[in-house]
């Protein structure tokens, strides 16, 4: 089947719908219908008035992580459940963040994760045969499945084929059937014109005699006989016949899926009405509204999503995986990450209209999707409260493609400065909560180059502008020289100086409005990019222990797989019961020159990691048993590639340096090359850096210098 012409835009709408649904449902997750009705009456907009970001949620942590298997192994339908299971382990922190870690035999995902780590491969890891129906048939099999429908537009059978493999990593039985249904419904939503047709076709991909189909057909039959078309009557029928009291476990898939199908039927194809019915029904509201949001986002398209739902999202969301630079995402990036696979699977080229924007590596904010802001906002540089800003995507003008970002600022009296900004690193104080325990590495580093195209409207007050980066550690703005701007597109360029102890947490354009009275400034920006190589040092005396809550503590700039990691005596300190790892930097870094001091504090393995692609793929240079070992992490198991005798002492720092060029790995101690090895067997060619401990090791780290090329 040929991919629809509006495929990429509908992928974007699907991701928006997912995020909108999750955000809409989170404040009342677990509530019953009666409580929602009593407290809120009718829900037709967001309940929360959070002025800060909503933290990560398992509904949005996992879907993209699992889809990564198609990049890691094969994009074809030959992908296996076992490979998707490896990808899950590669992305998931060890029993924190990512999932709901409710305990073995209680949380379906926790159970499957332990099974996978203990060597029980998918699909057995999530199966009814291994875990029993009560565990296997909880809701997660469908809440993580959305992208597998997005990659198969118009092909529900292919979507279900992928989804069955993905869902069976953690679930079984109806838990898998629900995932297949949702993925098929999303695939259908690209091409079908009637929501009933979407539901009927999607039900056709799962066994006709399963409980999921019996439930769905019963609700469809009730809807068809209900002349009043009163969804509350339908929900009463669901509660009486398919309610929580009839199914074991903490969050069974059948009652929640019943709500989803009912809301789509009674919502009659309207995005807002469908989400409101779904959320008003209660139970697992964020999961249900999230899945329905994706289906309806694709079905209704961008024009069908009321702008009131989009402003709170602002095109951005947080995740909680082990790779910090993949934890602060913008939705256009997600759309292309997904759609690129859709085109590859269909053996089609990305259309010329979209090809300049389809690269998902690095930073490229292009503002091509209607209403897309890429997370940009405007703020007064001097914290003055009298300027009102309006930030929106527009097709009035563009430097490339069709769209740009329009920023209006007024009133402007006298000389004023303001910033058009984008966050690139987040702290606990930026979030409303600590849901799912997110942590972050910066998206932008010293040494990299920024560029943007900028212009004013014709009736502008005199203005100048400059690119800048904000260092969160010092609070200082690192800024280019101001350049006068006018009504013609002008290029701004700036290379962030290399530096030590810098953490870039905001980038943007600083605008200076010259002497004016009761004026307004209307500015357009387009093609904001960050490229080039990093060159910086981490000064741990300038980093901090970040306290989210009593069970969630992080080191700034770092994510961690396992262990206790904190700043002690101006150094990074780590320890763990067996293995412990912490990471920072970009997963897209290629050739790298990384040096650090490692001080072993107890016997065990202590070293530095590099080309880290997650928990299951990396290299490390490690001190262990009076040796220096070059090791390769292959699917979670470290293999020694080579080692040399090496004398070190507990409590004495060792200066290590690793240089990677392609498959060649050189290791130095005090500038003396001591290992030179070329990995000729499936080498890892990109990845971030980190600290690695094993066998009960404990160590401290300092003087990190990182250069990429």
Image (cartoon, rainbow, N blue to C red):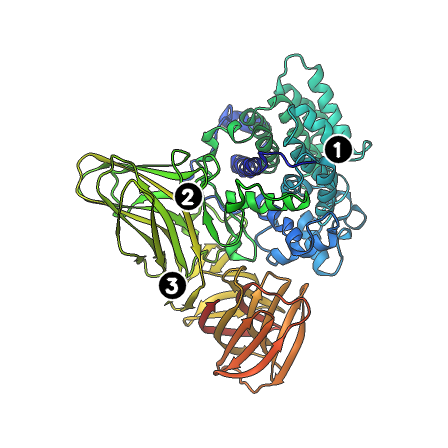
Query: Residue at horizontal 35%, vertical 64%?
Result: 497
Query: Residue at horizontal 50%, vertical 62%?
Result: 584
N-term mark: 2 or 3? 2
- The disc at residue 565 is none
Q: Residues within 10 Å of mark 3 (few under 14, many from 20)?
A: many
Near-viewer residue (136 or 634): 634
Q: Which is in the foreground here, disc 1 or disc 3?
A: 3
Answer left or right for 649 relative to 151.
left
Near-viewer residue (132 or 543): 543
Q: Which is in the foreground here, disc 2 or disc 3?
A: 3
Per the model, the C-alpha gap separating discs 2 and 3 is 24 Å
Query: Residue at horizontal 48%, vertical 82%?
Result: 671
Q: Is residue 662 visible?
A: yes
Residue 685 placed where, x, y %?
Answer: 59, 65
Residue 673 placed where, x, y %?
Answer: 53, 83
Circles 1, 3 touching at the beta carbon (< 8 Å): no
The residue carrying mark 1 is 212
Query: Element type at marker 1?
Result: helix
Q: Is residue 695 visible?
A: no
Per the model, the C-alpha gap separating discs 1 and 3 is 53 Å
Circles 2, 3 touching at the beta carbon (< 8 Å): no
Residue 411 placed where, x, y %?
Answer: 23, 35
Q: Residues within 10 Å of mark 2 (few under 14, many from 20)?
A: few
The residue carrying mark 3 is 502
Query: Element type at marker 3?
Result: loop
Query: Element type at marker 2?
Result: loop
The residue carrying mark 2 is 52
N-term mark: 1 or 2? 2
């Amino acid at each position: 089947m040929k991919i629809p012409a509006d495929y990429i835009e509908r992928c974007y709408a699907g991701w928006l719908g997912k995020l909108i649904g999750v955000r809409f449902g989170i404040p009342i997750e677990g509530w019953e219908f009666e409580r929602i009705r009593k407290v809120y009456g009718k829900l037709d907009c967001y309940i929360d008035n959070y002025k800060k970001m909503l933290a990560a949620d398992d509904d949005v942590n996992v879907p993209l992580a699992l889809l990564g298997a198609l990049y890691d192994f094969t994009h074809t339908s030959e992908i296996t459940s076992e490979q998707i299971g490896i990808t899950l382990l590669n992305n998931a922190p060890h029993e924190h963040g990512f999932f709901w870690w409710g305990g073995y035999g209680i949380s379906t995902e926790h159970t499957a994760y332990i099974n996978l780590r203990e060597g029980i491969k998918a699909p057995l890891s999530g199966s009814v045969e291994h875990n029993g129906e009560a565990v296997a048939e909880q809701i997660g099999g469908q809440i993580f499945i959305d992208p597998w429908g997005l990659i198969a537009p118009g092909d529900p059978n292919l979507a279900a084929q992928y989804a069955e493999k993905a869902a069976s990593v953690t679930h079984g039985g109806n838990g898998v059937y629900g995932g297949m249904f949702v993925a098929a419904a999303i695939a259908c939503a690209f091409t079908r014109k009637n929501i009933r047709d979407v539901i009927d076709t999607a039900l056709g991909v799962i066994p006709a005699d399963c409980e999921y189909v019996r439930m769905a057909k019963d609700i469809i039959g009730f809807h068809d006989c209900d002349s009043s078309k009163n969804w509350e009557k339908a929900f009463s029928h669901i509660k009486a016949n398919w309610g929580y009291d009839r199914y074991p476990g903490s969050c069974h898939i059948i009652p929640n899926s019943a709500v989803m199908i009912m809301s789509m039927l009674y919502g009659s194809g309207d995005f807002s009405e469908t989400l409101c019915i779904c959320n008003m029904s209660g139970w697992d509201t964020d999961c249900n509204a999230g899945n329905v949001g994706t289906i309806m986002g694709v079905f209704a398209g961008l024009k069908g999503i009321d702008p009131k739902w989009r402003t709170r999202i602002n095109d951005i969301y947080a995740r909680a995986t082990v790779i910090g630079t993949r934890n602060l995402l913008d939705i256009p990036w997600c759309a292309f990450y997904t759609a690129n696979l859709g085109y590859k699977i269909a053996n089609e080229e990305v259309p010329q209209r979209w090809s300049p924007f389809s690269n998902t590596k690095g930073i490229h904010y292009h503002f091509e999707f209607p209403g897309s802001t890429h997370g940009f906002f405007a703020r007064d540089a001097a914290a003055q409260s009298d300027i009102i800003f309006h930030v929106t995507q527009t097709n009035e003008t563009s430097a490339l493609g069709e769209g740009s970002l329009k920023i209006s600022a007024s009133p402007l009296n006298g000389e004023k400065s303001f910033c058009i900004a984008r966050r690139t690193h987040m702290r606990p104080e930026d979030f409303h909560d600590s849901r799912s325990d997110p942590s972050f590495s910066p998206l932008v580093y010293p040494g990299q180059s920024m560029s943007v195209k900028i212009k004013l409207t014709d009736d502008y007050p005199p203005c100048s502008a400059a690119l800048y980066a904000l260092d969160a550690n010092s609070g200082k703005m690192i800024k280019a020289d101001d350049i006068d701007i006018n009504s013609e597109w002008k290029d701004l360029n700036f290379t962030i100086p290399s530096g030590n102890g810098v953490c870039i947490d905001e980038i943007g354009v600083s605008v200076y409005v010259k002497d004016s009275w009761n004026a307004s400034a209307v500015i357009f920006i387009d093609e904001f990019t960050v490229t080039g190589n990093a060159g910086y040092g981490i000064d741990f005396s300038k980093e901090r222990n970040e306290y989210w809550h009593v069970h969630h503590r992080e080191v700034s700039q770092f994510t961690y797989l396992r262990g206790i990691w904190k700043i002690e005596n101006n150094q990074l300190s780590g320890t763990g019961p067996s293995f412990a790892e912490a990471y920072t930097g970009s997963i897209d870094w290629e050739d790298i020159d990384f040096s650090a001091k490692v001080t072993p504090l107890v016997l065990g393995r202590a070293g530095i990691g590099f080309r880290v692609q997650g928990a299951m793929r990396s290299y490390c240079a490690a001190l262990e048993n009076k040796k220096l070992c070059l090791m390769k992490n292959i699917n979670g198991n470290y293999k020694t590639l080579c080692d040399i005798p090496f004398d070190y002492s507990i409590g004495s720092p060792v200066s290590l340096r690793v240089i990677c060029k392609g498959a060649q790995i050189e290791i130095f101690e005090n500038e003396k090359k001591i290992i030179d090895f070329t990995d000729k067997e499936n080498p890892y060619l990109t990845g971030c850096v980190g600290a690695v401990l094993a066998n009960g090791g404990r160590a401290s780290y300092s003087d990190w210098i990182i250069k990429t090329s």
